[in-house]
Structure formats: structure tokens, C-alpha cells
Image (tube, rainbow, N blue to C red):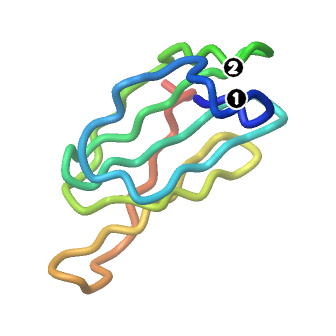
Amino acid sequence: MLDAGHNGEKLSSIDTGDGVDDLSYSPATHTLYVGAARAAQLTVAHVDDKGKLTLMAQVPTHEGARNGVVTKDDTVYLAHSQLGQLAGLIVASPGKR
């Protein structure tokens, strides 16, 4: 996490795994969702008011799952591709047991 208002100062970091293309952020819950295609995992982190990241969950997905879209109920839909072709969707609900 970088502070855009202060020359990009590093505020916090968290390991998300290899193969990150994109991330999603929910301002309502201050939650960051990062799908790592090569690592085959979805990292979910809370962002506090000072920009500190706290790991909430690392959810196994499938190799190639990335570019998550988050719904209001914190369900995450990740596109799953193989060799450049869309193979389906991966659905993860990290907050639900």
C-alpha cells in the first residue's frame, strides 16, 4: 500500500502470491481482494484508516483465476483462463463458512 499524497511512501505490504493482474477494493468494508493466477489463491485483506493491511484470508482457487469482481455480500467472481481462453468462473465467499 503506497501513500499517493506523500511521494508514494510505502505504508504496508502483504504477500499475495505470483500472477497478480488486478485487484478489487470494497470501500464499504475497507477490504482488498487480490487474485493471484499463478499462485492459485485469492488474498483478502483489511485496510485500516492509516493504510495498514491485515490478512483476513487466503482462499485456494485454481491456477489461472484472476481479475476478481466483488459483490455487496463479499462474494468474489474470478475469471478462470487456460492458455489464453476463458474456461469459466471461480466463485469464492471468503467471509462465509
Decide if residue 43 is on the left or right side of residue 40: right
Looking at the image, which residue sits at the far bottom?
85
Give percent across and percent down for residue 85.
Answer: 26, 86
Mark 2 closeness class: few <14, some 14–19, many ≥20 residues within 10 Å: some
Which residue corresponds to the image point at 32% horizontal and 68% vertical from the top-left?
A: 80
Sequence-earlier tag: 2 or 1: 1
Mark 2 touching mark 1, by CB under 8 A? yes
Pick the residue in front: 73 or 43.
43
Residue topped by disc 1: 3
Disc number placed over residue 51 in the picture, else none = 2
Residue type at the position of mark 2: Gly
Mark 1 closeness class: few <14, some 14–19, many ≥20 residues within 10 Å: few
Give percent across and percent down for residue 86.
Answer: 32, 82
Q: Quadrant of residue 60?
A: top left
Looking at the image, which residue sits at the far left?
83
Decide if residue 24 is on the left or right side of residue 59: right
Which residue corresponds to the image point at 54% horizontal and 13% vertical from the top-left?
A: 54
